Amino acid sequence: MSDERHTSEAIDLLVALIRNACVNTGDPTSGNEIRSVRTVQEYLGMEGTVVEPVPGRASVVYRLKGFDPSAPALLMIPHLDVVPADDAEWTHDPFGAVRADGFIWGRGAVDMLNLTSAMVVVFKWLTAGLMAQPPGDIILACVADEEAGGVLGARNLVDNHWDLVTCDYVLTEVAGPTLTTSDGVALPVTVAEKGPMWRKATATGTPGHGSQPYGRDNAVETLGRAIVKIAGSDQPVRVTEQWLLFVDYLGLDSDVTKMLKDPDSVDSAIETVSEYDIALARWIHACTHMTLSTNVVEGGTKINMIPDTAHADIDIRLLPGQDASDVDDHLRKVLGPDLFDEITFVPVLDMTANQSVTSGRLWNAIGAAAEHHLGTSRLAPIMTPVTTDARFFRERGIPSYGVGLFDDTATFSQMLAMFHGIDERVSEVSVQRTTEFLATVIEAFGSQRGES
């Protein structure tokens, strides 16, 4: 690494991005990613192209032209927004970016401002000539709104500004710590993700005075019965090929691993894992089930009025091979035909699962970087149950991967617990290692010859 390349810059940038508090509540007026766009512009010393479909909801795109127009282009697309945090439950202010005990504490530290800062720093190294110039274009798109489906960020760029982000390969999230099995260390690379099938459920009733409920059709009570049934039902199991390819990398007991490969025993195996690692159990459940979680409920206007409408937002995630008809079939089975017909389910977000191939130029470059930094090119292809901006590019057939390099003290379960959790934090060493790792990936990507 050049003496002029300082990975500490990524730490300073991460601190600044956390403190910008670009909190995305899902309301179009939230987020205010323009604050972090300005931080990125100031750090890079370049304006870039700012896309702001709604005031304050900004993304910024840069393109470093390669010297070979026929060479493939690589896009790095990190997001700038974060989810809310309740500071009363945190050890440190979630937007203070406190540096303590070797960590940077704050909302977004692992989702995904650690990667955002690393990618921005690597792009600066490229533009400053501190890295070898790849033959193809390198694009950096720091985007808004990922935490609410990407409609105002990556989706907007892909649909309306494709010329800005045209590429052949994508680097984004999710990054995870190394995994250790009897066969040695493996680096997880996110190659697939579940499909969000979010639904707004609405029940209707007849308004009336709250003092006289007899015989009334109460919308809140109707919706409540539906919510209880959904929450209490067994969520559909599906053991996918992707899961079978990955599960051995978890390094679990052989009997538990065998059970996790069998649809008939996977739930029992998850219960076993939950006894000693609840974060890992939750993640395994999500990777082997259609999941349904009712997360927002609204109904009624006044304590003495029987409500005529009630709404619930249900986060539904599908595995490969499942689609909207599977959601309807499950809800009809769980609620029964009568209650199902009383509820209207309107799509909020409707996408199937997606995945990328585990081969090709970028995959090989990640393996080469792993060999350089870890002494092994063993990559563990992983599916994430969360939704990322990669899906917009996979829809166009563009291979998209999420990867980083944590320090040796980070565990897979610890990383899982950080996402949208209390006391989110990342070690300073991990930020520095990820920055160096991504630089090596890009160097390896650019040095390949004769591969598409």
Image (spheres, rainbow, N blue to C red):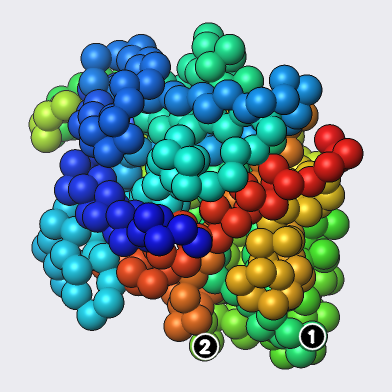
Q: From the viewer's perspective, is the residue at label 2 or at label 1 nearer?
A: 1
Q: Residue shown at 64%/38% (left/top)?
A: 134
- Could you say where residue 321 lies in the image, as x and y percent from the top left? 80, 42
In the depicted view, which residue is nearer to us: 362 or 177?
A: 362
- Could you say where residue 155 lies in the image, as x and y percent from the top left? 52, 22
2 or 1: tag closer to the N-terminus: 1
Could you tell me the amino acid type at mark 2? Tyr
Q: Residue shown at 63%/20% (left/top)?
A: 166
Relative to 348, is 205 on the left or the right?
Answer: left
Classify 264 as above or below 313. Answer: below
Relative to 341, is 323 on the left or the right?
Answer: right
In the depicted view, which residue is nearer to us: 31 or 286?
A: 31
Count of all numbered marks drawn on residues in the image: 2
Residue 213 quadrant: top left
Distance between the Cα atoms at labels 2 and 1? Answer: 23 Å
Classify 188 as above or below 152. Answer: below
Could you tell me the amino acid type at mark 1? Asp
Residue 78, can we see it? no
Which secondary structure, mark 1? loop
Which secondary structure, mark 2? loop
- Could you say where residue 401 lies in the image, as x and y percent from the top left? 65, 47
Quadrant in the picture for the C terminus: top right
**Contact (Cβ within 8 Å) of mark 2 with mark 1:** no
Q: Residue shown at 82%/65% (left/top)?
A: 244
- The extreme top residue here reads 160
- Could you say where residue 23 lies in the image, as x and y percent from the top left? 25, 39
Residue 47, can we see it? yes
Q: Residues within 10 Å of mark 2 (few under 14, many from 20)?
A: few
State the residue position of label 1: 183
Relative to 193, is 146 on the left or the right?
Answer: left
State the residue position of label 2: 276
Residue 109 quadrant: bottom left
